[in-house]
Image: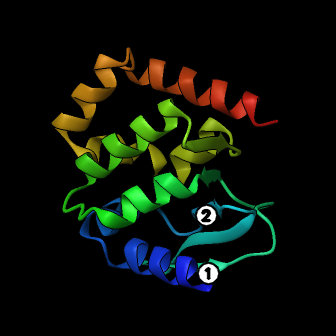
Amino acid sequence: MEDIFANTKDFLEGSPACRQGMECLNDGAKISIVLEPNFICELKKSKDTYSLEKASSHRDSDVVLRIHPDALKHFLAKDFSNLSDLGIEIIKEIFVGRIHLQVVAKSRQLVQKGYLKLPLAAGAPFLSYLASLGLNRMTKIFQWIEVLRKKGR
């Protein structure tokens, strides 16, 4: 499990796409990442830096991503140079069930912590992909977030 953690940490802290995404978030943003089997990590933004650390729970997180080992291998094998490509792949993995997204924070908190800047920062290809899924307006994105939030309760 240590190798998986180290590789995931290198990917999340070193990828240009991940850096671009984390720059959108405000201090205090916390994303829990649960690697199979129940190995919990926390990606935190603090003082304009971010890091992935081991965690004992995902109690205080804004978002929880449970990543299937096959999805993790897929991400670690690719070189994502931009946020758009990474975002599209994450959404695809959510829809095929290899990533389970649980939104814990309320919509207002997500806005305050900068999460809703991510689609705009990802740009036109990502926004077009969301539109192809019927998520073509912020109201639709908020509705989807609320469905995910309620599902995670």
| Callout 1 secondary element | strand
Mark seen at residue 30:
2
Q: Is residue 108 left or right of residue 58?
A: left
Residue 34 point in image, percent of width and height: 66, 61
| Callout 2 secondary element | strand
Residue 1 point in image, percent of width and height: 64, 79
Q: Residue at x 65, y 52 (%)?
A: 64
Q: Is residue 123 visible in this depiction of the protein?
A: yes
Quarter holding the C terminus is top right
Q: Is residue 50 visible in this depiction of the protein?
A: no
Mark seen at residue 53:
1
* Depth check, front residue: 74 or 151: 74
Q: Is residue 77 left or right of residue 145?
A: left
Q: Residue at x 68, y 45 (%)?
A: 105
Going from N to C along the chain, the mark reached first, 2 or 1, is: 2
Q: Label 1 neighbourhood size at 10 Å, few (<14), some (14-19), many (20+)?
A: some
Residue type, mark 1 in image? Glu
Residue 140 point in image, percent of width and height: 46, 18
Q: Residue furthest top?
A: 134
Residue 102 point in image, percent of width and height: 66, 42
Q: Is residue 103 left or right of residue 44?
A: right
